[in-house]
Image: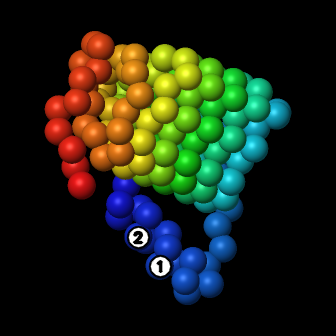
């Protein structure tokens, strides 16, 4: 995620413009979408979702109502977040991970595949398990 961020910033500084790549099956009604995002097939985004710039949503991801997603966030296949979740910059959410409602995820956190997040996550935390626990910090 850091490399994606650094590369995008370098391209922006050289005058590059970005567009979104959205699969035609995805309904973005009532979604606020930044620039440079990739949204693959079978992604569900509900009402009042706000997405930053340069994010990637892999097939089968679900982003429930009123979620706020920062820049450079990556959703692996099948990642699911419930309503009113806030995700900081540079977060990686692993395959089939689930984040329960009203959770705040700090910037540059990593959530392992299949993890079930039941409480707020601090910046730079690496989480895994059910329920998800901090394994280490990756700063």
User: Residue 56 — which label?
Assistant: none
> What residue is shown at x 63% (from left), y 31% (from top)?
67
Is 70 on the left or on the right of 97, as rendered? Answer: right
Q: Residue furthest top?
A: 130
Q: Splitting the image into 4 quarters, where does residue 134 fall?
A: top left
Task: Find out whether the residues at labels 1 and 2 contact each other: C-beta distance under 8 Å.
Answer: yes
Query: Is residue 131 toward the left or the right of residue 26 in the image?
Result: left
Q: Position of residue 84 (x, y in %)?
A: 62, 26
The front one of 135 and 53 is 135
In x, y percent, where is residue 20?
67, 55
Crowd tier of the residue under label 1, counting other residues whose Cα lies within 10 Å: few below 14, some 14–19, many 20 or above: few
Question: Label 1 belongs to which residue?
Answer: 10
The quadrant of the picture occupied by the C terminus is bottom left
Where 16 falls versus 28 (above or below)?
Answer: below
Residue 24, picture quadrant: top right
- Left or right, 21 with respect to 31, comes to left
**Residue 85 shows in this picture:** yes
């Amino acid at each position: 995620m850091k490399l994606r961020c650094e590369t995008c910033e370098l391209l922006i500084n050289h005058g590059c413009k970005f567009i979104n790549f959205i699969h035609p099956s995805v309904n973005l009604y009532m979604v606020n979408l930044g620039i440079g995002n990739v949204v693959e097939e079978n992604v569900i985004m509900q009402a009042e979702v706000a997405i930053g710039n340069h994010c990637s949503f892999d097939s089968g991801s679900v982003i429930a109502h009123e979620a706020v997603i920062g820049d450079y966030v990556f959703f692996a296949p099948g990642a699911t977040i419930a309503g009113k979740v806030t995700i900081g910059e540079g977060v990686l959410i692993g395959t089939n991970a689930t984040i329960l409602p009203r959770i705040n995820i700090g910037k540059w956190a990593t959530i392992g595949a299949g993890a079930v997040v039941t409480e707020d996550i601090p910046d730079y935390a690496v989480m895994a398990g059910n329920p998800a626990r901090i394994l280490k910090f990756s700063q």
